[in-house]
Image (cartoon, rainbow, N blue to C red):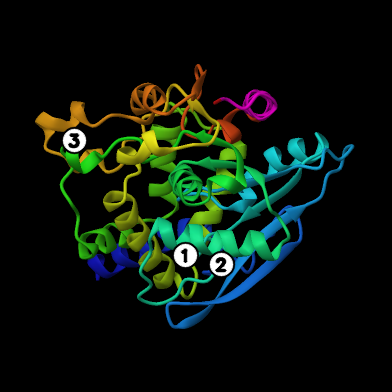
Amino acid sequence: MVRAFVAVAALLLAAPTLAQTPQLGADLEHFEYPHPVHWFETFSQGSVVRMAYLDVPPTGPANGQTAVLLHGKNFCAATWEDTIATLAQSGWRVIAPDQIGFCKSSKPEAYQYSFHTLAYLTDRLLTEAGVRQFALVGHSTGGMLGIRYALLHPERVSALVLVNPLGLNDTIAEGVPYAPLEELRGAEEATDEASIRAYQQRVYYQGEWTPPYQRWVDMLAGQYASEGGDSVREAQARTSDMIQTQPTAHELDRLAVPVTLIVGQEDLTAFRAAAAPEALRDQIRTVPQAAEAAVERITGARLLRLEGLGHSPQVEAPARFEQALLAALARPSL
């Protein structure tokens, strides 16, 4: 009887915590974006897929230019909200897509994710949207996609801005063991609001936490907690496999577009470094460390260091980040 009472009490105590995570839908059906959502529909790998995207016109005097913003793995088009507002006020048309497998876009079963595929679909979306040339801004995993896109379509990229990008170093070559898809799926099973927040607070924000950060944690956690959350876990596992096996580090010297790296210097991100043997972990370079070497390999590239900021400067200090971004776009390198 006592054991039964304790078990019931434990469930009652846990219930409020569980209820705090809103079910936002596997495709974020119940999460409002800051601008109207547009849709690009196409056929890919045997099924019809849809990509959600924001297409925001200038709110200040138009400069005739377009900026395309590529989100990271733990982010969505909506996370660019402050950046979009500043660019639009500065005269830019801004397009921010949700990539296949993420956020409001389709998460096809057994999809084979690659940066080539994502670049191909993004290129088709931009063509349908009537955009010929544009400045390309990629954050985190979106930086890897930006590099791949610029390698495939240099004629369309007027400037490439990489914000705390992954892929500047090959973490498997540095000592991180390869994780098969089953292992990556297992890690996703343990992902919830608490684990997302703990990771971001430690790695992205130097242990600090402010209320604006929570919105983006709730956005991700609300996908996992929803009916259909297994499709989110599967897509996240498969895109992690894409990141670990398709680093762009070995092709940086082939970039032939103006490149600026904007890097928060307190970023501790080193993809799956915790899985490396303890004796090798110091050899797995963080994003700022990898950026120092990468800028020397990219012809004409420059590195803007944001001191005191972490992996997500556009969230952590929007005004500082936007100032750096506008400066980068005003003076492309190369």
Magenta residue check for 297: no
Q: Which residue is mark 2?
A: 105
Q: Secondary structure at mark 3?
A: helix
Q: Which is nearer the N-term, disc 1 or disc 3?
A: 1
Magenta residue check for 331: yes
Q: Is residue 10 visible?
A: no
Residue 181 x %, y %: 24, 63
Region rendered in magenta: 319-333
Mark 3 is surrounded, within 10 Å at the Cα level, by few (under 14), some (14 to 19) or many (20 or more) other residues, namely some
Amino acid bearing label 2: Ser
Q: Which residue is mark 3?
A: 174
Q: Which residue is mark 1?
A: 101
**CA distance separating discs 1 and 2:** 6 Å
Against 112, residue 123 (above or below) is above
**CA distance separating discs 1 and 3:** 28 Å
Taking the spot 47% from the left edge, 71% from the top edge, the residue there is: 107
Residue 146 x %, y %: 50, 45
